[in-house]
Amino acid sequence: MADAVHDLGDSLSIGSAWLLNRLGKKSADSEFTYGYRRLSLFGALINSLVLIAGSIWVLSEAIPRLANPVMPVTEGMLALAILGVMVNGIAAYRLSKGYTLNEKILNWHLLEDVLGWLAVLIISIVLQFADWPILDPLLSVGFTLFILLNVIRNFWVTGKLFFQAVPDKALHKEIEHKLLAIDGVSDIHHQHLWSLDGEQHVLTAHIVADHEGVFGPDEYCAIKQSIAMALEQYPLAHTTIEIELTEEACRDQPVPSQTDQH
Ligand SMILES: [Zn+2]
Ligand SMILES: [Zn+2]
């Protein structure tokens, strides 16, 4: 029964991750103008929750067994465990190339399965020689805690991206410095950096052009060219830069200071 539930969870989780990843590659349309990349973030969130719930359930089963361990039936366990480690190991290895957040979560899920079978393998070997029934719940708890901690860490990262947190504070600062270093730029405010899916980011900012009296098409073009060069190296899917003149009032709500921008 437990295995059936676990397998169903696996299939749903892996299936939905695959589906959301595929749908996420759809290009933007007139309604979803940023495209569908956030679907993969959504998939990562759902899969983290499934994995966290599953791990807590495994712990709730295994922890009471620490107090009174039952000797498992080891007949045929060894052969089954070798098969389990091999099949799940190959699957995990083949899918481990992914680097999006969704794929990372999926990898933890597959690793959980491999570790589960590895635990069975170790137990079935050790129990041939020693009478240590506590090994079974002990390995379950250990491996599950390891998975749980990593999944919670991923869940936290994904959750923050979901609420448009700055994906990388150092990158945010670096972009600010790069833009401020441009000749003729005296200030930057309303700089917002958020991420579509952890890979591709969106940047908006207001920069103040200190033009010393003249600000014609030449100065405008020079600044725009410098901005393009400064931002070229970053993974920005959508960039919007507003150029303000020193005497111009900001259209958006005032921000306290350059270092205290929101
Ligand atoms: Zn703003
Ligand atoms: Zn402004």
Image (cartoon, rainbow, N blue to C red):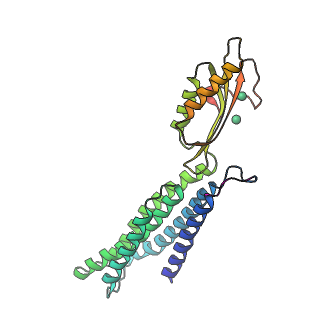
Side (left or right) of 62 relative to 253:
left
108 over 169 or under it: above or below: below
Asked whether residue 27 is drawn in magenta, I would say yes
Q: Quadrant of ligand 1?
A: top right
Whether residue 175 is visible, yes or no, is yes
234 over 88 or under it: above or below: above
Q: Kindly identify the residue that appears in the image at 48 percent across and 80 percent down.
A: 3
Q: How many marks?
A: 0
Pick the front one: 179 or 160 = 179
In terms of image quadrants, where is residue 232?
top right
- The main secondary structure of the magenta stretch is loop
Residue 19: image x %, image y %?
59, 66
Question: Which region of the structure is painted magenta?
Answer: 25-29
Asked whether residue 157 is drawn in magenta, I would say no
Residue 133: image x %, image y %?
32, 79
251 over 16 or under it: above or below: above
Q: Residue furthest left?
A: 129
Q: Kindly identify the residue that appears in the image at 67 percent across and 53 percent down.
A: 35
Residue 157: image x %, image y %?
54, 51
Side (left or right) of 225 relative to 104:
right
Q: Residue furthest top?
A: 213
Image quarter hosting the C terminus: top right
